[in-house]
Amino acid sequence: KQEVTQIPAALSVPEGENLVLNCSFTDSAIYNLQWFRQDPGKGLTSLLLIQSSQREQTSGRLNASLDKSSGRSTLYIAASQPGDSATYLCAVNGGSQGNLIFGKGTKLSVKP
Amino acid sequence: NAGVMQNPRHLVRRRGQEARLRCSPMKGHSHVYWYRQLPEEGLKFMVYLQKENIIDESGMPKERFSAEFPKEGPSILRIQQVVRGDSAAYFCASSPLGGGPNEQFFGPGTRLTVL
């Protein structure tokens, strides 16, 4: 049974720092992995999607890597800003039906 | 191109009432997934539907919960005789193609509160 773990559960950094969020999964047989952002009381915004054949994806200040064999993904945020404060969710798609399995998220706070 | 739409955004029900949550997928998407986010928990898959078909309902509670995606109109998640433990955020996601490696796009969610 696939399980997704995100470490740390919460992170507080000063503005301008580069930071890394971690995601691990127990079954390496996945189709893809998505990183989402969730603001309090809001829905999910897709940040990056990495297919199983890819090693990384980049969008602006965000870079996500995938090491399928070791069951790990990282989300790198460069030059963090207060507007980056949110909960970041990692989800893997490993089933033939496509349903996502989520981690519990990392709650990020960027202090001005 | 409008995104995934869900309504209502907030729903308050008393114990024993019925809750109906609606999801309109993105234009051109015929695959819908429902997820539930309980307080302090991660999102959990509930059900996957195509038009007029339930493909995978392995995450649905056995009783009181049902879902449909008719040929015309939105997908509906129905909860009968709600209990306090049903209080959660319910998210819908849509995809142009089902299964496998396809990206899912999420709606804003419906926050259900059971009094």
Image (cartoon, grey):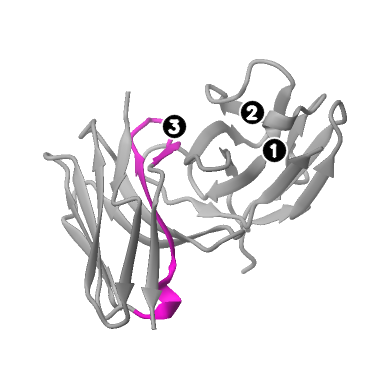
Which image quarter: residue A103?
top left
Near-viewer residue (A102 or B101): A102
Image location (x, y in percent) of residue B42: 47, 41
Residue at the image position 52 percent from the left and 55 percent from the top: B105
Q: Is residue A90 magenta?
A: yes
Q: Position of residue B23 (x, y in %)?
A: 70, 48
Image quarter where the C terminus of chain A lies is bottom left
Identify the chain of the residue marked 2, using the numbered disc in the image.
Answer: B
A89 w.r.t. A64: above or below: above
Disc 1 chain ID:
B
The amino acid sitting under disc 2 is Asn
- Residue furthest top as drawn: B62
Label 2, secondary structure: give it.
strand
The residue wearing badge 3 is: A97
Disc 2 marks which residue? B53
Proximity of marks 1 and 2: CB atoms separated by less than 8 Å: no
Circle 3/circle 2 CB separation < 8 Å:
no
Amino acid at pointer 3: Gln
Is residue A69 rendered magenta in the image?
A: no
Left or right: B32, with A34 as reference point: right
Disc 1 designates what residue? B87
Secondary structure type for disc 1: loop
Name the N-terminal-most of marks 1 and 2: 2
How far apart, in angstroms, are the residues tagged by discs 3 and 2?
Answer: 13 Å
How many other residues sit within 10 Å of disc 3, few (<14), some (14-19) or many (≥20)? some
In this rendering, position of residue B27 left or right of residue A100: right
Q: Which residues are magenta?
A: A81-102
